[in-house]
Image (cartoon, helix red, strand yellow):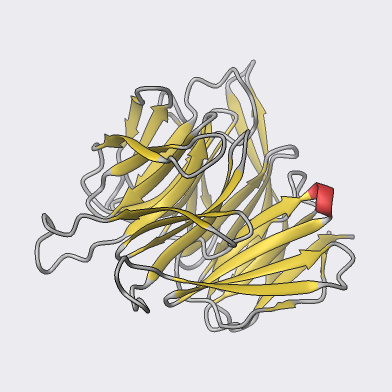
Amino acid sequence: MYHKEKSIQIKNSASALYNNLSVLRIAPRRLTYFTVVHANVVNMVSASWDGLNYSHRQLQSKEPNVATSTSLIMQVAFCVLPSRDLLVVTSQKGIQIYESDGSIMVYWHALDTSDAPTAQAVFARGISAVWDNYICVGVSSGAILVFDVPSKGSNITLSEVLEEHKEPITDIASECSGSQECIADLVSADDGGNLCVWKSGKEFQLLNKIPGFDMSCSSVKLWKGIVVAGYGTGQIHLFEAVTGILHAEVNAHARWIYSLDIAPFSGLLLSAAEDSLVRVWHLTVTPETNSVEVAHLHNECVTDTQICGAKFCDGDGYAFAVTGYDLSEIIRYTQL
């Protein structure tokens, strides 16, 4: 179903972080941007669709009044809003928001380290754009920071802080199907495997809490009102977002899941884990019977590699890309 394409080389290898790959497709320019975290650096590659041109850029983690920061980056993600695309970088010190090509930093938010107990790490992780003008970022206290983003310029403001989780946020995702009928449009996950389902707006509403089972939920997605959650057990659970009903439990991997992704137009689900496997599944949601079906379609083994990032390169799932710990390349697969 898929075959391996020529890999894209990156300047530094990928760190062993959840969801350590972000992809932005820029159709008018026939380009795709890829970003991968290595320690305190973001490796960014712009690749032309014909495979002939690649350009590289590196973004350092930043702190005010410090020339070079050693602050470790936890995650980098593209945020697509109706009016603009932005690149968000989270670290141990704060949150940096850039123009999507990484050229200009438009906003910096420092994390408050004063309240944290001495033995507790402070960091930001979990990034998602939601609704017309919000970017949500999770922090290690369990709070979610909601930033209001103007259609242009750098006048980004912290509009709300959602304090429902008690453990560090691992991942945040917004409804990706484009459906206007879904009540829930945001889901957040934490280190205890707890999920919170939200409705965004001027004031965010908590719609549902789905309790965890003391196992970290490392990656989460929301599609057609269904929460897809990947865990350290190697399992994937599919819940109805608003009611929390468990529709399916998939023993997908033998080891810790690091990344999930959904191709919103086709319902393809990508899962990647420490067991060197990347699997492609197909989700079918039937609203009339309130049923969700999962079918396994394909898997690829990246031998002797702890996979830490996997993302579809387009909305149909025609191609996907994979990163692995200590690999200085992005491996790509396309449909036959």
| Residue that appears at 16% across and 65% down | 120
Residue 64 percent coordinates (x, y): 31, 65
Q: Is residue 244 visible?
A: no
Residue 324: image quadrant is: bottom right
- On the rendered structure, is 207 left or right of 101? left
Check the image and report above or below for 129 versus 271: above
| Residue that appears at 67% across and 74% down | 56
Is 64 in front, or is 47?
Answer: 64
| Residue that appears at 60% across and 65% down | 35
Quadrant containing the N terminus in the rendered view:
bottom right
Is 6 in front, or is 109?
Answer: 109
Residue 3 percent coordinates (x, y): 83, 67
Check the image and report above or below for 65 versus 19: below
Residue 174 percent coordinates (x, y): 51, 37
Quadrant containing the C terminus in the rendered view:
bottom right
Is 74 in front, or is 227?
Answer: 74
Residue 44 percent coordinates (x, y): 62, 69
Q: Is residue 20 visible?
A: yes
Check the image and report above or below for 223 versus 311: above
| Number of marks in picture | 0
| Residue that appears at 73% across and 52% down | 25
